Every structure is written in C-alpha cells, then in structure tokens.
Image (cartoon, helix red, strand yellow):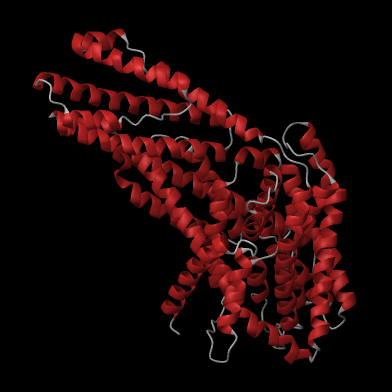
Amino acid sequence: MHTVETVLLVLMLGALTGIVARYIRAIPLPLIQIALGAVIAWPQSGLHIAFDPEIFMLLFIPPLLFADGWRIPKREFFSLARPILLLALGLVVFTVFGLGYLINWMIPEIPLPVAFALAAVISPTDAVAVSAITRNLGMPDKTMHILEGESLLNDASGLVALKFAVAATLTGTLSWGAVARDFIYMAVGGLAVGALLGWGFSYARSTITRRLGDVAATQMVLLLVLLPFAAYIVGEKIGVSGILAAVAAGIATNFGDLDRSSYVSERLQTEGTWSLVEAAFNGAIFLLLGLQLPSIIGVPLHEAGHEWWILVGYVVAISSGLLLLRWIWITLGVHGALRRAHHSGKMAERPSALLNLATTFAGIRGAVTLAGALSVPMLLNNGEPFPARGMLIFLATGTILFTLVMGSVMLPIILKRLPPPGEPPTVREERLAREAGCIAAISELTLTEEDVEKHSPEWVAMHQEVVGRLSQEYRNRLQLLDDGSGVATSLESSREAPEIVQQRKHRYVLEIETRLKCIRAERDAVYAERHKHRINDETLRNIVSELDLQEVSMRKRLVAARRAAGLDKTKGASGAH
C-alpha cells in the first residue's frame, strides 16, 4: 500500500474509532484503536507498515507535546513543580536502576546495559492514554495536572537515559560524569531553545498582527502548527532534547497569548485546529502501535525459542515491578511533597493511600515507549546483532498493553472509592472572574462628558436607554443572555411611521455596538484576572471562548443592522473590529 493511502486509511480509522468509543464507553479508546490495528495487520495479506522511529518521533510527538504544554494550566504546573519533577526525573532514575537490575537478574540473556535500556524505554508515561481512561471517572484535577506535567517532562528524561544505555551497549563503557553533564546540557538546552523559539514567534506574531489585525489569522495559525516541528528539529540538530524544546515552545507561546485578548478570529481558528490535530494524531499513534503487534510478537519466539507463556510471564513480572517501583517512589518520595502542597493550598485533594494507588495505576505507557524501543539499533559497532533487541521490543510492547489494561480495570475501581472532591476551587474562581467581567462591562457603559459633547441629544437619549437595559442585565446575570433577536424581528414587521422605524433601527445598531464594547471589557477583565493568577488557563479558555462566540455573533448582527439602517458600511465594519 502506498504511503499516502496508508496515511489516509489510518486517519479515517482514527476518526471512526473515536465515534465508536462514544458508544462503547466501557472500553477506553486507546485499547479499541490498538485492537483494530492488530486485527487489520494480523492476516498474512493484512496491512503492514514499516515503522520508522525517527519519522514517527518527528511527525507525531512534537505537535502533541506542544499542545499539552500550551494547554496545561501554568499556575498549577509551576506551583506543583516539586512533585512533578520528582516523578519526571527522580522516578525515571529510580526505575532505570531498580528495574534494570531486576530484568538482568530475571532474564540472564539480556545484558545489564540492555536491561537498563529496556527500563529506560518503559519509564515515560502517556498522558493521552491516562486522560482517555480517566475521562468522566472523577480523577482529582490537581492530580491530573501532576500526571500531565510528569508526562511532558519524563519523555525527554526516559529517552536520554535510553540513549546512554544504548551507547554503553555499543561501546562497552559508561562514564556517569559524562551522563550527568550531557543530561543537564540536553535538558536545559532543549528548554532554552524551545522557549526562545516560542518567545520569538510570539513577538513576531504580535508585531505583524498589530499592523494587519485579524486579517492574517489563518496564516498565523498555520505557522503556529509548524512551530513544534521547528522547535523539535532545531533542538535535535544542535544536540539538545527536541522533545523538551517542543514542550517549552508550547508553554512560551501560551504566555504570549495572554497579551492577545482582542484577536478573536485567530483564537477561534487556533482552538479548532489544535483540537483536530490532537484527535487525528492521537488516533494514528495507537493504530500504528496495533499495526506493529503481529510482527513484534513473533520476533522473540523466533530469536530465542521461548515458549509464549514464559514471555507473557516476563511481561507480567516486569510490568508489575514497574508499577511497584512507581508506588514505592510515590509513597516514600512524593507523598511528602503532595502533603505540603495540600497544606499550602496548592492542591485541593488530601494525599492518601488510595490517591497514591490511583496515581500508580495512572502510570500508563504509550507511543513514546514503542518509538524508543524500535529506535534501538540493529547492529553493534563491530557488526554483530544488538543483543536481545527483539526481546526488548516485545517486552516494551507487552508493558504498554499491560499498563493500559490494568489502568482500564483498576482506575475506575479506585477512583469510585475516593471521597467526593466537593466544589473544585476553579469553579469559585470562574464565578469570581465572571463577576469581574460584569463589573468591567458596567463601568464601560458610563458616558463621558466628551461623548455627550460629541453626539446629538437624540443619540445621548438613545444611549442612556440602552445603558439602562444593559446595566440591568449585567446586574441580574453573570453572562450575557439576551442576544437582541426580538428587536431585529420588530424592525422588519413594524408598521409605524418611517421616522420612528428608522429611530428603532438606529437604537438597535447602538445597542449592538454597546454590547460589543461590554463583551470586550469583560474579556479584558478576565485576562487581567489571569495575569494576577486568580484563575488558571482552563478557566480563562472556558470564559473567553464564550465571549468570543458572542462577539462573532454580535459582529454579524451589527453588519446586518447597519445595512438595514442605511448607515455607512465601512464605518460599521470598522466599528465591529
């Protein structure tokens, strides 16, 4: 099958399985996609795709990690930095050493450096799979933010550990000082490159859109979609972590978005584009994983002649050891940081044994693990085959499936036993932000002396009438509910004198223009609340998306109302922006 046809088929199947998962809620979407991929690849004449890890890492991982870095609430990410780093860095090191020695002891034909490589490749978690499994199950918000932050950072730490473990296998030597030095260089360099590119893009975008406005919104969104690829490629070219560069670019771009409250069209297009990219790429990743299963399963059976039940036993033992090490690290190493975060008000949920257990089973492995395993070279420097490569790939794949199944089974059971979380702090924050927006809108309605002098008494009277009605709405409700559709109908059906009809039309135009001013004042107030860290990025997006849709609707109504009133079209268009 040609590459183009394969890509189209994978994207189509990803969309179809997403629809099917809405009806089969008992089975998480990643498991459905993996199973479907295995089914269509299993027969001799099935779909077989050559999996190139480098192309896979370049095409799929950067945009997904960029989107995660862009969407994750920055306030929670930085306030919970200690437990996130303990999981993303400390747990990876703990897993590589602890599980590496266990694998080498249990399977002697796997040399110790290869065992470290296997432990490194299965150390990164997959936030996509976690969110797909825990959706609507009640995972506490702050715990989910910790898991998301962990998965953003431990991809890089796990792959860096894999790189050095493979290098030790190829050369037979390993310098721990060089490992520490290179790790710091790759991590810090990757973050610096990504932050620099994200900031540079945000600065250039602001400079351009200040001149052009929202006219170039589509082109800016396209450049934004290409930014994570640029960050990844630049990072890899200069020898730092391309993964962390993509993450840092997403975080930096999000900070740049906080000063772009007035660019409605670009923001709406960005949200829709990233939703499409994430849905398509997430589906493709798990389908590709399933497509590799038939070829992966047969390799260790052919290489070492193991019975299938022995291989399954290895997978269960390694995966259980992986989860046990994760539970030990969370209980002994992270629990204290979580307790301090709870007491300081940074984390609403109280750390408990059940929450630790839920966090343990949420350590699901996914696409980065498979790509890392398949990236292991086939030959040593002397031309001999890389030892136990087929076994490494098989065990890594088995660990992905084991953690997915265990997470699907255990997380619903554990999360149902957690105490009710009560009202999340973000609910109260959102309510206060909406109140701040309403207050800002009411203050925007005040007529200045300059406005009175500039306009006629008739205009001032109409404005006061509109202000009275809008002020009452904002005092009674937290958001704009009346879209003025009844007024539009009365304009068409009125049989009053022509001058009265024209006055009604002018009043309607004035009302819409005033509503637009109020919406913009609300949005500016909500952005101000985010700048003061009174709300997080999720709350900001929820409120702003509502206000953006209201503004788009009002702009269209304004154009139609000005046309009906016979007013200057150019002036009306400029007033709508």
Relative depth, front residue between 403 and 489 = 489
Q: Who's the residue at 63% across and 37% down the image?
A: 75
Choose top left, top right, bottom left or bottom right for residue 237.
Answer: bottom right
Quarter of the image with the N terminus is bottom left
**How many numbered circles are shown?**
0
Q: Who's the residue at 68% across and 64% down the image?
A: 159
Percent position of residue 175, x then y: 80, 65
Percent position of residue 483, x then y: 34, 31
In the image, farthest residue toward the left: 498
Residue 405 seen from this side: yes
Percent position of residue 573, x then y: 22, 34
Choose top left, top right, bottom left or bottom right for residue 2.
Answer: bottom left
Q: Is residue 324 above or below residue 380?
A: above
Q: In this view, does 52 lie above or below 251?
A: below
Quarter of the image with the C terminus is top left
Q: Who's the residue at 71% across and 41% down the image?
A: 80
Q: In the image, 215: left or right of 198?
A: left
Q: In this view, does 49 lie above or below 164?
A: below
Q: In the image, 118: left or right of 518?
A: right
Q: In this view, does 430 lie above or below 300?
A: above
Relative depth, front residue between 421 and 254 = 421
Percent position of residue 126, x then y: 66, 60
Residue 567 seen from this side: no
Q: In the image, 95: left or right of 472?
A: right
